[in-house]
């Protein structure tokens, strides 16, 4: 893999480059002493897979640099700093930093972090390769358009099931509702392209009720089923929050926690849940204001991103 190191301390850059070389992790294709010299397109042209960047630098710090390059840079980012502020670490993770290394540089820690990121990158590449193979099959298919549509629905379900497993809720009753929601949104977007915005949660629950009971169902029965679906989904999303918070409490650098926690939930809610678990407070999902719509949107767009890559 190709690495790029940005740190205003030449000694730190030298140590990191030596570790990468000695452990045959890849090659360092570039170095800089400040974030002001970085831009996403140049990193992409140099085929940088992993950027190691210092938090504090004289002209443009690490967080500001990441905000600047993130829209275009395609690689992974590892933050380096001697500051152990939870607020700064949280901010870094919200910017989709993969991992955080604390100074002074420790070889064992550096190796563990880089190997984790490399493993994560390899997993994403494997999924991407599978998707490319599926796309090739689709392009070779000379069947009817209806078959292609069905294949795409299979895709959204396939990646939806993968994400639901990653989020720790594959065994929950509401996971079936979430899968139905993905298919509904997939077909809704094909028809309306979200031109008038994302469907309301009430419309989504009404759809689930009508699909289960049929169009001829009694109105009162449909309302009860829509309410039941809403409760199942909420309980399932709450379980996902609990699962991710547990991972973060055990290991703040857990890959799944880093990748999904702030993407599917407001990070203040995640931290509140982590505190609740740490203090062994009685869990009350009804007292936690979870943004269900954000979760559903994140689930759909993440599944779609994986499907289309």
Image (tube, helix red, strand yellow):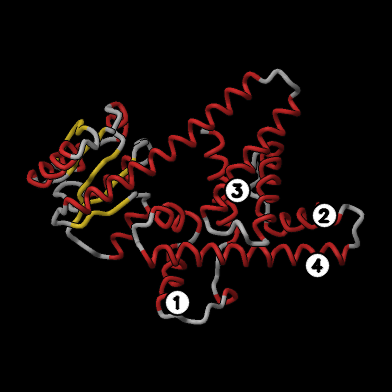
Mark 2 vs mark 3: which is more N-terminal?
3
How many angstroms separate mark 2 from mark 1 (CA)?
Answer: 38 Å
How many angstroms separate mark 4 from mark 2 (CA)?
Answer: 11 Å
**Vertical position of residue 189 compared to residue 244: above or below:** above
- Which residue is found at the position 33% from the left and 45% from the top? 117
Q: Residue furthest left?
A: 11
From the viewer's perspective, is the residue at label 1 or at label 4 nearer?
A: 1
Q: Which mark is residue 210?
A: 2
Mark 4 vs mark 2: which is more N-terminal?
2
- Which residue is found at the position 55% from the left and 53% from the top? 165
Residue 40, given in percent of the width and then of the height, sits at 31, 35
How many angstroms separate mark 3 from mark 4 (CA)?
Answer: 27 Å
The residue under label 1 is: 276
Asked whether, in this view, residue 90 is left or right of residue 266, the answer is left
Q: Residue furthest front?
A: 23
Q: Are marks 2 and 1 in contact (CB under 8 Å)?
A: no
The residue under label 3 is: 161
Mark 1 vs mark 3: which is more N-terminal?
3
Mark 3 vs mark 4: which is more N-terminal?
3
Crowding at mark 3 (Cα within 10 Å: few <14, some 14-19, many 20+): some
**Vertical position of residue 215 compared to residue 13: above or below:** below
**Vertical position of residue 224 compared to residue 123: above or below:** below
How many angstroms separate mark 1 from mark 3 (CA)?
Answer: 28 Å
The residue under label 4 is: 224
Crowding at mark 4 (Cα within 10 Å: few <14, some 14-19, many 20+): few
* Disc 2 secondary structure class: helix
Crowding at mark 1 (Cα within 10 Å: few <14, some 14-19, many 20+): some
* Disc 4 secondary structure class: helix
Asked whether, in this view, residue 26 is left or right of residue 234, the answer is left
Q: Nearer the viewer, residue 165 or 287?
A: 165
């Amino acid at each position: 893999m190709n690495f790029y190191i940005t740190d205003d301390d030449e000694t730190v850059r030298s140590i990191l480059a030596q570790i990468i070389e000695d452990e045959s992790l890849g090659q360092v294709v570039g170095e800089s002493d400040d974030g002001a010299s970085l831009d996403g397109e140049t990193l992409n042209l140099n085929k940088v897979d992993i950027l190691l960047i210092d938090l504090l630098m004289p002209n443009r710090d690490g967080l500001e640099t990441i905000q600047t390059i993130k829209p275009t840079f395609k690689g992974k980012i590892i933050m380096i700093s001697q500051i152990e502020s939870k607020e700064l670490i949280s901010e870094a993770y919200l910017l989709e930093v993969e991992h955080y290394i604390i100074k002074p540089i420790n070889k064992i820690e550096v190796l563990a972090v880089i190997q984790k990121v490399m493993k994560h990158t390899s997993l994403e590449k494997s999924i991407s390769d599978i998707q490319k193979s599926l796309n090739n099959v689709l392009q070779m298919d000379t069947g009817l358009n209806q078959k292609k549509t069905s294949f795409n629905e299979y895709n959204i379900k396939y990646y939806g099931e993968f994400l639901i497993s990653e989020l720790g809720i594959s065994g929950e009753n509401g996971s079936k509702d979430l899968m139905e929601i993905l298919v509904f949104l997939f077909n809704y977007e094909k028809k309306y392209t979200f031109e008038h915005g994302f469907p309301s949660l009430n419309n989504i629950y009404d759809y689930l009720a009508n699909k289960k009971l049929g169009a001829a169902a009694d109105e009162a029965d449909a309302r009860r089923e829509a309410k039941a679906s809403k409760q199942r989904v909420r309980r399932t999303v709450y379980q996902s929050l609990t699962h991710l918070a547990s991972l973060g409490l055990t290991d703040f650098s857990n890959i799944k926690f880093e990748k999904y926690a702030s993407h599917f939930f407001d990070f203040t809610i995640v931290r509140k849940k982590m505190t609740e678990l740490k203090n062994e407070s009685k869990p009350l999902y009804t007292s936690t204001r979870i943004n269900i719509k954000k979760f559903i949107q994140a689930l759909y767009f993440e599944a779609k991103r994986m499907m289309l890559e």
